[in-house]
């Protein structure tokens, strides 16, 4: 039989794991893509140009232009829906040090997955491990 204390500790650990996972997923979704980034203005200008090109294009070229238009519109929608990670970042900061100590996760490991140094500092996770 599992004690109430053990159940509580497990639930606490699972909640921390969900918090860390939520933050890392949000962080990953906001990571810039590789390569040169198109500006919103340039994408909007291209969207305005495409209908005229589509109307005059031969069928094969038309399907490519229609796909380009759909891709640009989706990307512009994503630009508007930028993820605000401040809430999950605050939750992460509140539990990260305890979670790191319990799970043995180093500063370097957090940095490797993209957690900013400023967030780790705010969470109280030092660059070097202390030897207790």
Image: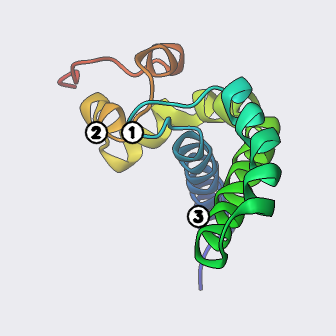
The front one of 25 and 90 is 25
- Residue 105, position as x, y percentages in the image: 32, 42
Indicate the quadrant where residue 117 lies: top left
Q: Secondary structure at mark 2?
A: helix
- Report which residue position mark 2 lands on: 109
Q: Is residue 123 left or right of residue 132?
A: right
Indicate the quadrant where residue 4 lies: bottom right
Q: Is residue 131 left or right of residue 12?
A: left
Q: Earlier in the sequence, mark 3 or mark 1?
A: 3
Residue at screen point 76% across, 41% down: 49
The front one of 57 and 81 is 57
- Measure how far apart labels 3 and 1 are at the Cα level: 39 Å
Residue contact between numbered discs 3 and 2, judged by CB atoms under 8 Å = no
Residue at screen point 81% across, 50% down: 52
Query: Is residue 61 placed above or below 47 in the rendered structure?
Result: below
Which of discs 3 and 2 lies nearer the camera? The answer is 2
The front one of 7 and 50 is 50
Query: Is residue 3 placed above or below 97 in the rendered structure?
Result: below
- Residue 93, position as x, y percentages in the image: 59, 27
- Report which residue position mark 3 lands on: 10
Q: Is residue 44 visible?
A: yes
Which of discs 3 and 1 lies nearer the camera? The answer is 1
Residue contact between numbered discs 2 and 1, judged by CB atoms under 8 Å = no
Residue 34, disc:
1
């Amino acid at each position: 039989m599992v004690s109430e204390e053990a159940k509580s500790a497990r639930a606490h650990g699972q909640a921390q794991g969900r918090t860390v996972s939520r933050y890392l997923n949000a962080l990953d979704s906001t990571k810039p893509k590789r390569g040169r980034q198109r500006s919103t203005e340039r994408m909007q200008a291209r969207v305005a140009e495409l209908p005229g090109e589509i109307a005059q294009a031969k069928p094969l070229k038309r399907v490519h232009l229609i796909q380009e238009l759909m891709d640009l519109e989706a990307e512009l929608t994503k630009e508007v829906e930028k993820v605000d990670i401040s809430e999950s970042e605050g939750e992460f900061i509140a539990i990260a040090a305890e979670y790191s100590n319990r799970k043995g996760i180093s500063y370097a490991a957090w940095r490797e997955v993209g957690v900013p140094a400023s967030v780790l500092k705010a969470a109280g996770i030092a660059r070097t491990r202390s030897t207790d």
